[in-house]
Image (spheres, rainbow, N blue to C red):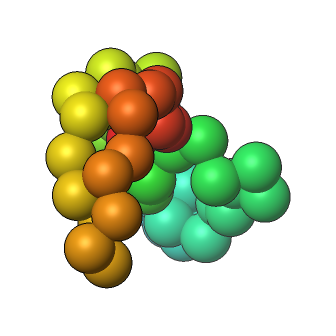
């Protein structure tokens, strides 16, 4: 009985510790967002067509989004 209780306690503690650790992972590069311990999306190069910015015409270009 004592060994079963100890095993269940260790299992609960390890699963709780791994869940907390997964929530607190930080990506310094900013290439991915974290949501509930899972990577949601990676930034991609996206083509932005020509547009006006602050009254000036900007040519088409790529941006990371």
Residue at x 46% of width, y 27% of height: 62
Q: Residue at image x 32%, y 51%?
A: 57
Q: Which residue is nearer to you in this view: 15 or 48?
A: 48
Q: Quadrant of residue 2?
A: bottom right
Percent from the top left, x then y, of residue 28? 78, 58
Q: Name which residue lies at 47% across and 36% down.
A: 63
Residue 56, position as x, y percentages in the image: 34, 64
Whether 16 is drawn above or below 58: the answer is: below
Q: Nearer the viewer, residue 23 or 56?
A: 56
Residue 26 sits above or below residue 57 on the image: below
Viewer-closest of 26 and 22: 26
Residue, x 44% and y 56% (percent of image)?
34
Q: Say which quadrant the C terminus sits in.
A: top left
**Residue 42 in sight here:** no
Q: Residue furthest bottom?
A: 54
**Residue occupying the far right of the picture:** 28
Of residues 47 and 30, which is closer to you in this image? 47
| Position of residue 35 measured from the top left corner of the image (x, y, whole percent) | 33, 58
Query: Total label count?
Result: 0
Inspect this view and state whether residue 56 appears.
Answer: yes
């Amino acid at each position: 009985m004592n060994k079963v209780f100890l095993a269940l306690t260790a299992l609960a503690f390890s699963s709780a510790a791994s869940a907390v650790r997964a929530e607190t992972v930080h990506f310094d590069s900013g290439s991915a967002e974290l949501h509930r311990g899972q990577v949601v999306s990676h930034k991609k190069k996206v083509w932005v067509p020509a547009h006006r910015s602050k009254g000036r015409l900007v040519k088409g270009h790529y941006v990371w989004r």
